[in-house]
């Protein structure tokens, strides 16, 4: 619980000296492109301090990261319509405040699968995070630990299950699983995650094959990125990024899959035959809590719960898989109804502000996952940039709750947020004209 303007540990400002926060080691003082990353850690004056929204951080990220890497993060599949619609749905939310029910403090905590979280969101799994910034997954997990929210390590993360547990030993850690063709390595991953204290497994089910990421294809993005004639100019523009890429631990992940484009790598690894039998197998193999990520309709949500899921994640993978699929925020109510309170319902896709998170909770989500937002912070300024994301989202959540007149997450109801112009099947003519004066 925290007062507006009184930073809670979730929204605490980043200190300037190493000794202020032992879990926030300074990045190498004077950067090779002449910028002093240490200075920005004061929060108020550096470029991160001047970022007041996630959109501001995105702009900084775009300048500081090679175009192909920024595009990999920022982009989506095919015409990117799903991603745009995810964001548009949040823009169409109308928040409906109540007045004369003021409170001096609002409680932003909520229980997510049996554990209190300081804020009602978790960091979503993202692949190859050390490519966005050399601080990578460990930096994101340290910020999550400090903020008291869960962090999800991707099975195509660039930090091992063990290293990540060492980086954030007190944090709540979740592990995201893609089912590989090679089931033995899947079993190994699951066992390792359990042994290293990850309490929840997120099984991603919307990736039988990789989505059509046209920006990556056009940029010729390979993992790991390579210095080639066409990337040399970029190296001149982003020397810091290339320096760290070439001097830090090579970008490897999960099972040794060799190199190639993202599409090649994932096509080699992912098993397109994933089925309910695999979910059953996993339910028997994994002793912890299980979430199924990538649900977009009531029928699949029901099946996932009937086959042992403790949570379903209403998600279209941030628009990165099949384009023009339903928008998670819009299908949230029907999924919630189908689940009948037997599992938690989380939502992701398009969340770019604390008000978005509050809206999703009011509309029926038990918690949200945040993806690109924290990656923009990471690209903008490493660990300090991710901390800035938490500061911004936390402050926006508190402010929105105060202005809505709610004192706690549990007080949010569908009366607090509605979608303007909700997308419905085309109306019949008589419905369209029913309330028009003079209409018969
Ligand atoms: C760069 C990037 C990498 C991602 N990698 C994974 C992944 O490895 N596993 C997974 O289940 N989802 C992955 N996702 C999807 C996110 O977990 C999440 O569903 C999505 O980012 C939510 O949308 P948002 O970015 O608009 O918040 C990735 C998303 C991005 C942007």
Image (tube, rainbow, N blue to C red):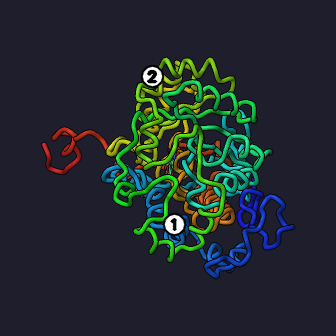
Q: Residue furthest right?
A: 19
Residue 359 makes an appearance in the image: yes
Disc on the earlier residue, 1 or 2: 1
Q: Nearer the viewer, residue 36 or 1?
A: 36
Where disc 1 sits, the SS reads: helix
Q: Nearer the viewer, residue 252 or 382?
A: 252
Query: Percent position (x, y) of residue 21?
Result: 82, 63
Residue that carries the numbered disc 1 in the rendered image: 58
At 64% from the left edge and 42% from the top edge, which residue is drawn?
410
Identify the residue shown where x is 79% and y is 45%. 169
Residue 99 can be seen in this image:
no
Tell me the residue that label 2 is attached to: 275
Placement of 305 over or under 155, stated as above or below: above
Quarter location, residue 18: bottom right
Cβ at disc 2 under 8 Å from ligand 1: no
Q: Is residue 190 left or right of residue 57?
A: right
> Based on the displayed image, in which of its 4 quarters is residue 403 positioned?
bottom right
Judge whether 96 appears above or below 243 on screen: above
For mark 1, does the 10 Å Cα neighbourhood hold few (<14), some (14 to 19), or many (20 or more) residues? many
């Amino acid at each position: 619980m925290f007062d507006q303007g009184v930073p809670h540990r979730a929204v605490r400002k980043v200190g300037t000296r190493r000794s202020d926060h032992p879990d926030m080691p300074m990045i190498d003082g004077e950067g090779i492109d002449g910028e002093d990353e240490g200075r920005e850690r004061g929060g108020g004056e550096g470029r991160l301090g001047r970022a007041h929204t996630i959109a501001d951080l995105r702009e900084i990220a775009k300048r500081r990261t090679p175009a192909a890497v920024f595009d990999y993060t920022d982009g989506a599949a095919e015409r990117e319509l799903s991603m745009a619609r995810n964001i548009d749905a949040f823009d169409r939310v109308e928040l409906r405040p109540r007045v004369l029910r003021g409170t001096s403090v609002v409680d932003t905590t909520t229980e997510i699968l049996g554990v209190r979280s300081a804020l009602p969101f978790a960091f979503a799994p993202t692949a190859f995070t050390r490519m966005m910034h050399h601080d990578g997954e460990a930096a994101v997990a340290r910020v999550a630990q400090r903020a008291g929210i869960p962090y999800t390590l991707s099975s195509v993360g660039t930090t091992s299950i063990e290293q990540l547990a060492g980086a954030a030993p007190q944090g709540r850690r979740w592990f995201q699983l893609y089912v590989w063709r090679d089931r033995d390595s899947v079993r190994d991953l699951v066992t390792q995650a359990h042994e290293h204290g990850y309490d929840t497994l997120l099984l991603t089910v919307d990736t039988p094959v990789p989505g059509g990421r046209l920006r990556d294809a056009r940029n010729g993005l390979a993992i790991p990125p390579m210095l080639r004639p066409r990337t040399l100019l970029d190296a001149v523009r982003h020397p810091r990024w290339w320096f760290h890429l070439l001097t830090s631990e090579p970008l490897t992940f999960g099972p040794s899959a060799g190199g190639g484009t993202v599409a090649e790598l994932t096509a080699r690894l992912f098993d397109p035959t994933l089925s309910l039998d695999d979910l059953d197998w996993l339910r028997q193999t994994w002793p912890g809590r299980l979430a199924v990520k990538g649900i977009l309709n009531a029928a699949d949500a029901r099946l996932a719960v009937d086959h042992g899921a403790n949570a379903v994640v209403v998600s279209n993978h941030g628009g990165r898989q099949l384009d023009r699929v339903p928008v998670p925020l819009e299908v949230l109510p029907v999924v919630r109804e189908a689940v009948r309170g037997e599992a938690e319902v989380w939502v992701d896709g398009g969340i770019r502000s604390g008000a978005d998170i509050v809206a999703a909770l009011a509309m029926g989500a038990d918690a949200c996952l945040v993806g690109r937002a924290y990656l923009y912070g990471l690209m903008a300024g490493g660990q300090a940039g991710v901390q800035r994301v938490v500061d911004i989202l936390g402050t926006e959540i508190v402010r929105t709750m105060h202005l809505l007149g709610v004192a706690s997450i549990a007080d949010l109801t569908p009366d607090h947020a509605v979608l303007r112009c909700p997308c419905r099947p085309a109306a019949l003519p008589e419905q369209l004209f029913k309330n028009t004066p003079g209409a018969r």
